[in-house]
């Protein structure tokens, strides 16, 4: 009888532990979710961005293509970094090609030629982030250097002055984190929506 009693006590302890930890996990989830919604509602809901008509057009955290139905880049928009996942968040990832891989080298050379021609700049002016995809394939930001080589094209396509477009690039440039971590960067979606609002 004693072994059965000991087994029952052990089982009861296990059941109580299961109930306690289940309650703790559920409570923790509700507390963290509530704090997120209370203190950081925009971030907690995916950092979604709306256009001038109030339609959700994407997230400031996920890059997207600005191209026509044939996949050709639209000249009136700033273009993002290349994407190994074709900007598909469900397929996020890099190409996993090493720096000496002939496929990657050929892709970089092709992109350099295309981007230089599209933006009417010397191939030497095309910055590295315009040539290589990010590790996730979904990087929403580009370098200031990549934004700069696109300003004249966007201004001409929209009938805006270079100074107007440059001012928007400056406005949507995020400085280094804490003043020294990383590089200044430009969020492509936010900048393009700002351009659309300007008309």
Image (spheres, grey):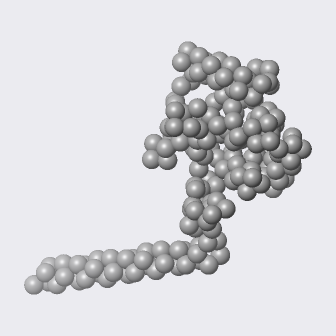
The residue lying at 64 percent from left, 55 percent from top is: 60
* Residue 37, image x, y percentages: 58, 75
For the residue pair 40 and 69, the one nearer the viewer reads as 69
The residue lying at 67 percent from left, 62 percent from top is: 52
For the residue pair 182 and 77, the one nearer the viewer reads as 77
| Residue situated furthest right in the rendering | 163
**Screen quadrant of the N terminus:** bottom left
Q: On the image, which quarter does residue 13 sit in?
A: bottom left
* Residue 76, image x, y percentages: 71, 40
For the residue pair 124 and 94, the one nearer the viewer reads as 124
Q: Is residue 63 left or right of residue 26?
A: right
| Residue situated furthest left in the rendering | 1
Q: Is residue 87 left or right of residue 9?
A: right
* Residue 42, image x, y percentages: 63, 68
Can residue 117 be seen here? The reply is yes
Question: With respect to residue 76, does 174 lie above or below?
Answer: below
Question: With respect to residue 116, does 153 lie above or below?
Answer: below
The residue lying at 23 percent from left, 78 percent from top is: 11
Can residue 145 be seen here? The reply is no
Q: Is residue 135 left or right of residue 12?
A: right
The residue lying at 71 percent from left, 27 percent from top is: 118
For the residue pair 192 and 45, the one nearer the viewer reads as 192
> Looking at the image, how many numbered discs can be counted on the residues?
0
């Amino acid at each position: 009888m004693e072994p059965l009693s000991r087994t029952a006590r052990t089982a009861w302890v296990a059941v109580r532990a299961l109930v306690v930890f289940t309650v703790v996990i559920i409570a923790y989830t509700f507390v963290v979710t509530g704090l997120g919604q209370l203190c950081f509602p925009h971030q907690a809901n995916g950092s979604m961005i709306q256009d001038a008509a109030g339609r959700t057009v994407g997230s400031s955290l996920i890059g997207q293509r600005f191209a026509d139905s044939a996949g050709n880049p639209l000249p009136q928009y700033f273009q993002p970094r290349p994407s190994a996942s074709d900007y598909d968040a469900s397929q996020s990832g890099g190409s996993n090609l090493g720096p000496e891989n002939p496929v990657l080298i050929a892709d970089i050379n092709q992109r350099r030629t295309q981007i230089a021609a599209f933006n009417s700049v010397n191939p030497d002016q095309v910055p590295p982030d315009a040539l290589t995809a990010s590790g996730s394939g979904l990087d929403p930001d580009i370098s200031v250097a990549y934004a700069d080589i696109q300003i004249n094209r966007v201004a001409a396509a929209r009938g805006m002055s270079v100074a107007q477009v440059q001012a928007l690039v400056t406005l949507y440039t995020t400085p280094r984190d804490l003043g020294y971590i990383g590089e200044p960067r430009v969020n492509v979606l936010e900048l393009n929506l700002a351009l659309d609002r300007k008309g």
